[in-house]
Image (cartoon, helix red, strand yellow):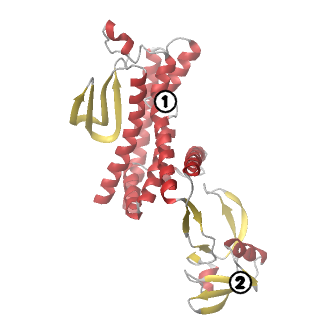
Amino acid sequence: MMNSIISFLIVLGLLIFVHELGHFIFAKLFGVRVIKFSLGFGPELIGKDYGETRYLISAFPLGGYVKMLGEQPTDEIAPEEQTRSFAGKAVWQRFLIVAAGPIFNLLFAVFLFFAIFAISGLPESVDTTQVGQVANGSAAETAGIKIGDIILAINGQETKTWEDVSDQISAGNGNVITLSIKRGEEILELSGQPTIQPTRNIFGEETGERYIIGITRTDEIKYKPVSIGTALMAGFSQTWTFIYLTIMGIVKMVQSVIPASELGGPILIAQLAGKQMAAGWINLFYFIGLISVNLGILNLFPIPVLDGGHLFFFSLEAILRKPVSRRFQEICQQAGIIVLATLMAFVFYNDIARLFKG
């Protein structure tokens, strides 16, 4: 439990810091006065003034903020400080200041994956015919196949790769097949009858059918050393893959392909962070990179109170060549708060339901 809490604070604190740092750097770049830089919301726990900014850690760790001069329409600004206010900047500058938060999260993911690949190398799956899992009640379990068995041949045809195993099972067209198995020093001949099952993609959608006996191979990974340039390109590629999967995951959830019960909140993140930390630094860095991508993408959604909502208003301002009315923004923000509050309540419910099921 303590490991999960510590891991959660490390993961969330780091990602919030990176996100708010993006806003902070671009605000400073455009000459906006930053009043506060906070990790967390609510009452101040620890704070220190440095220059014109107060840096603090607040009581509730589920977020953070950068408070800028003139950020709110109701802020009173002295005439001499008008040029240093957020509201006094051009719309494209305000757009970049707000967009910098989620963009920094995406770039941070690139950095993490780059660091993993530069230090450990690129992961490669070791092609093997060794059995990693046997499904309960499957033809393989009935035949007596066990985890760790090495499949040497099927119906007399040698199998050197897992693709060979899949091809030979399919080639049997559902008829009984004979597998030559190496178990320790023994060579065994086992028989089983494949069953036809639907194939599914990563989102659980059916993509076809194939014959299976209920086995999967071992997940053995080796790391191949690569140059700094290759590691950097792989970092961008891995980040893009996670961006695509995040967006498609949301699309599939809207389409009801993925059940809403799969959504998780802080409790699930804490549990997963604890497991990844226990598994080693590579697993933890991968997990932080994935969450960083999720945070970056979700913040870009055009929901008021999120960065994406502000970017939507700035886009309208640029198109209409005048600011969106305050009343319209207030109505949208109230709607956004309701949406986010409902979503937070739902993911907390899912988290608690998982705890009771577990």
Q: Total of numbered circles in the picture?
A: 2
In the rendered image, the quadrant that contains the N terminus is bottom left
Q: Residue at x 66, y 77 (%)?
A: 213
Q: Secondary structure at mark 2?
A: strand
CA gap, disc 1 to disc 2?
56 Å
Depth check: give the residue in front, 241 or 205.
241
Q: Residue at x 33, y 26 (%)?
A: 67
Say what amino acid the circle numbered 1 marks.
Answer: Ala
Q: Indicate the position of residue 246 as horizontal and vertical percent values.
A: 55, 46
Q: What numbered label is drawn on residue 99?
A: 1
- The residue that mark 2 highlights is 153
Depth check: give the residue in front, 240 or 132.
240
Say what amino acid the circle numbered 2 marks.
Answer: Ala
Picture quadrant of residue 154: bottom right
In the rendered image, the quadrant that contains the C terminus is bottom left
Residue 13 lies, with reference to residue 313, above or below; the image says: below
Q: Indicate the position of residue 241 as horizontal and vertical percent values.
A: 59, 49
Depth check: give the residue in front, 314 or 85.
85
Give left or right: position of 167 versus 141. Answer: right
Q: Residue at x 55, y 81 (%)?
A: 148
